[in-house]
Image (cartoon, grey):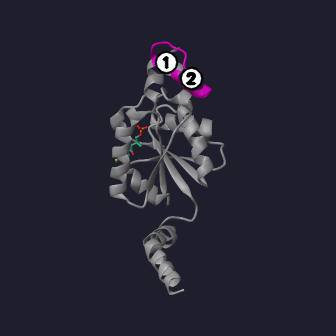
Amino acid sequence: MAGRTAGASAARSAIAPYQSAFHFRIPLRISLMRRAIYPGSFDPVTNGHLDVVERARKLFDEVIVAVADNDEKQPLFSLRERLDLLRRTVGEIDNVRIAQFKGLLVEFAKAEKAGAVIRGLRAVSDFEFEFQMALMNRKLNAVVETIFLMPKEEYTYLSSRIVKEIARLGGDVSSFVPACVTRALNRKFNR
Ligand code: PNS
């Protein structure tokens, strides 16, 4: 009996740090709602992004698709255009919200009371950059967890950069992006 009591006490001490972190500290700082941020340039949104949104929204109460307002990347589409294309593709989904952010991602996550950042991981080539970003974000704010989701295999080779290049060179991108994005790309490249 004494052994059982000692065992239970040891088990309690072993889980105590996690209990305090997960059951008390985080819910007080983060909202009880399981909210995640899916950040990116979305220049423009592709079917691969939509696949990740669909997976993320099944795991969280709310997913905020957050478009980075970062002119350094010299996007093809303006911030307004990128937001508009996202609104027209995922804007109607119940637990998905479209937003923009400037500055540090972890600060935006904190302001939105989000406990997780979602990133799509397509191939090993993505890993190095994503790993660095996830660890740096953790250093900046240890409470926000990065979660990687793998899109369908057929989107492994798909990226906004490649879609823009194909469209610029006159190729058909209609099977890679939503219809409104195909139209927007054709307009950009005068087709
Ligand atoms: O779609 P992208 O271009 O790969 O998205 C990159 C993005 C926007 C998620 C990343 O550049 C970012 O988080 N920018 C915000 C600034 C920031 O927090 N930088 C530190 C990350 S380690």
Percent x, y of residue 146:
44, 51
Label 1, ligand 1: CB separation under 8 Å: no
Label tally: 2
User: From where the camera sits, is residue 142 visible?
Assistant: yes
Q: Residues within 10 Å of mark 2 (few under 14, many from 20)?
A: many
Q: Residue at x 45, y 78 (%)?
A: 10
Kind of residue at badge 2: Thr
Image: 169 above or below 54: above
User: From where the camera sits, is residue 103 visible?
Assistant: no
Span of residues in magenta: 166-185
Label 2, label 1: how far apart the Cα atoms are: 8 Å
Percent x, y of residue 113:
49, 60
- Compare residues 156 and 113 and report the one nearer the observer: 156
- Residue receiving disc 2: 182
Nearer-N-terminus badge (2/1): 1
Q: Residue at x 59, y 22 (%)?
A: 175
- Residue receiving disc 1: 167
Numbered disc 2: secondary structure: helix
Kind of residue at badge 1: Ala
Q: Residues within 10 Å of mark 1 (few under 14, many from 20)?
A: some
Numbered disc 1: secondary structure: helix
| Magenta-span inclusion, residue 180 | yes
Quadrant of residue 31 within the rendered picture: bottom right
The picture quadrant for ligand 1 comes to: top left
Residues marked 2 and 1 touching at CB (< 8 Å): yes
